[in-house]
Image (tube, rainbow, N blue to C red):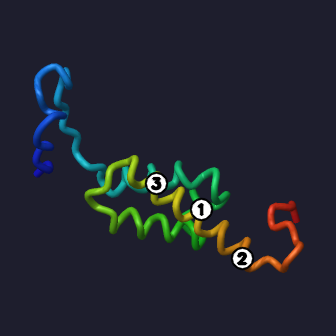
Amino acid sequence: PPPPPPPGAPRRGGRLHAHITLRAPTPAQRRAILTRAAAGLAPDAADTDTDTGALLRSLADEAHGLSGAQLVAVCQRAALAAARRAAAAAPAGEDSTAAA
């Protein structure tokens, strides 16, 4: 069932013209959303035989109830955390953004 509507001001007349309820994405839709969101972050995101693809498949299976926007935010936060870990692991004075 959908969550209850927020109380108070956001629901008063004149603030919202329509109330639309959307269902949470299915596991297959979550996989597609995660794969698309991770495509620019991990080149092997679409390949389910890689660690990244397997991780996205597992995450999609476990992330029931999350919206598409929330799934994209998960990918963005993971990318930021990975970048921070890489920057912290790089030796001092080495540019971690330089192409190999």
Relative to 43, say whether 93 is above or below.
below
Q: Which amino acid is tagged 1?
A: Ala
Q: In which quarter of the image is the C terminus?
A: bottom right
Of mark 3 and mark 2, the one earlier in the sequence is 3
Q: What residue is drawn where x is 41% and y is 67%?
A: 59
* Amino acid type assigned to the residue bearing label 3 in the image: Ala
* Residue at x-position 74% and y-position 80%: 89
Q: Name the residue under label 1.
A: 79
Is residue 34 depicted above or below 61 in this figure? above
Mark 3 and mark 2: Cα distance apart in space? 22 Å
Q: Nearer the viewer, residue 82 or 59?
A: 82
The disc at residue 9 is none
In what element is the residue under mark 3? helix
Percent x, y of residue 21 = 18, 37
Q: Distance between the residues labelled 2 and 1?
A: 14 Å
**Crowd tier of the residue under label 3, counting other residues whose Cα lies within 10 Å: few below 14, some 14–19, many 20 or above:** some
Find disc 3 in the rendering and name its residue: 73
Q: In this view, does 60 lie to the left or right of 96?
A: left
- Point out the residue furthest to the front here: 9
Q: Nearer the viewer, residue 25 or 67?
A: 67
Q: Which mark is residue 88?
A: 2
